[in-house]
Amino acid sequence: MPEVTPRPLAELTTLRVGGIPRRLIEVTSRDEAIDVLRDTWNSGEDVLVLGGGSNLFVGDDDLELTVVRLRNEGIAVVGSPTPGVVRVRVEAGHEWDAFVAWTVQAGLAGVEALSGIPGTVGAAPVQNIGAYGQEVVQTLHEVELIDAATGDVTTEPAASLGLGFRTSVLKAHYGSVAERDAVILSATFDLRAVGTEPVAVAGEQLRQALQLADDALISLAEIRDTVLATRASKGMVLNPDDPDTYSAGSFFQNAVVPESFVRTLPSECPRWLMPGVAEVADRVIGLDEYDGVLQPVIHTERLFKVSNAWLIESVGVKRGFRFPGSRAGLSTKHALALTNRGGARAEELAELARYIRGRVHSEYGLLMEPEPILVGVEI
């Protein structure tokens, strides 16, 4: 078994906090991952599967659990039944941004707007990562899973994962457990073969982010460069020389709320209509159909995503905010990122998160939910 000397998870997470696990196992192949996961699950150990550590907030105390770190890498082109589409299978431990860079160089479109997002390919569907109008759900074809209860390995379509806004059946949201306890071993994507020359940009949100006209042409490489520069300006690209990047990305997930709640917020608060909400039309019932019973009318409210960053700053918690003497603070570039300014303990970050969460809840009645997975720490 590829067991190594346990190290503090502060060395393996982008927030740079976390105690020492009881055991640390690093796997470098699919078969190794299967054997190790089956063994550890069968032994009854508490297991934490770790990818890039970019969506994880771990407490400072030593951890009575086994950490299995997935480092299996590799990209393979497999056959696609659709003309103009290239199907690509990627190992779970492959760095996400390295995969995106590979697709851009190969002239394959579909994930270029997700450049610069830290973490691994195996973690991307769990969170259904997205940016600038692109989400994993748009290109993911299938995943290979190993089930924690049975140890069975199956290949399942993306539709079985319940992919939604920053969620899936595999994600354990704060205060809950995942609907399905399984680990992704590999992910397969369907990408459009567009080449490396300038092409029209699919997706209105991406065109708006890039400030492009509807008929503008731009190469995948230019899109990637622009996205990387934009993310870097917000401290969202890992940089060892920039404490603003010692974070878990956006700490609080932008809330999706019904229209009735949106009306209670200040008009200045940015909001975006979420797609896919069915419109309910009135129905006229003819006399020949009427049986004396009228079914209740179900009204479906439209849903909106609102800007938690705006809400945070509007209650007076500005970028760069921190308590006197604390080594944790908001990013100086982005109000949604809680950052480790150097040597912060997990409790300092948790204290800041609780304060921000409480201020927004008190002012607007919205209880913001943390986006990263919390282990051994509460907010």
Image (cartoon, rainbow, N blue to C red):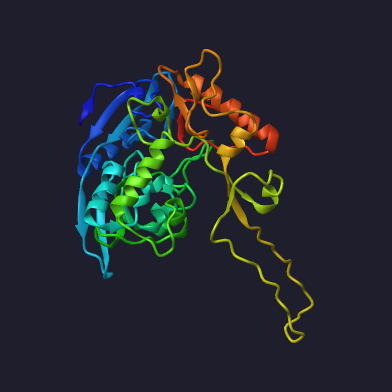
371 w.r.t. 162: above or below: above
- Report how many numbered discs are placed on residues in the image: 0
| Quadrant, the N terminus | top left
State the residue at coordinates (60%, 33%).
313
Between 339 and 76, the residue placed more toward the observer is 339
The extreme top residue here reads 325
Displayed quadrant of residue 239: top left
State the residue at coordinates (28%, 51%).
221
The extreme bottom residue here reads 288
Displayed quadrant of residue 18: top left
Instruction: Answer left or right for 177 relative to 279.
Output: left
In the rendered image, residue 30, in percent from the top left (x then y), is placed at 22, 44
In the rendered image, residue 379, in percent from the top left (x then y), is placed at 55, 27
Instruction: Answer left or right for 307 relative to 341.
Output: right
106 w.r.t. 8: above or below: below
Kindly tell me whether residue 63 is visible in this rendering: yes
Displayed quadrant of residue 3: top left
Between 372 and 202, the residue placed more toward the observer is 202
222 w.r.t. 314: above or below: below
Kindly tell me whether residue 146 is visible in this rendering: no
State the residue at coordinates (28%, 69%).
82
In the rendered image, residue 248, in percent from the top left (x then y), is placed at 43, 33
In the rendered image, residue 258, in percent from the top left (x then y), is placed at 65, 52
Between 156 and 254, the residue placed more toward the observer is 254
State the residue at coordinates (35%, 30%).
45
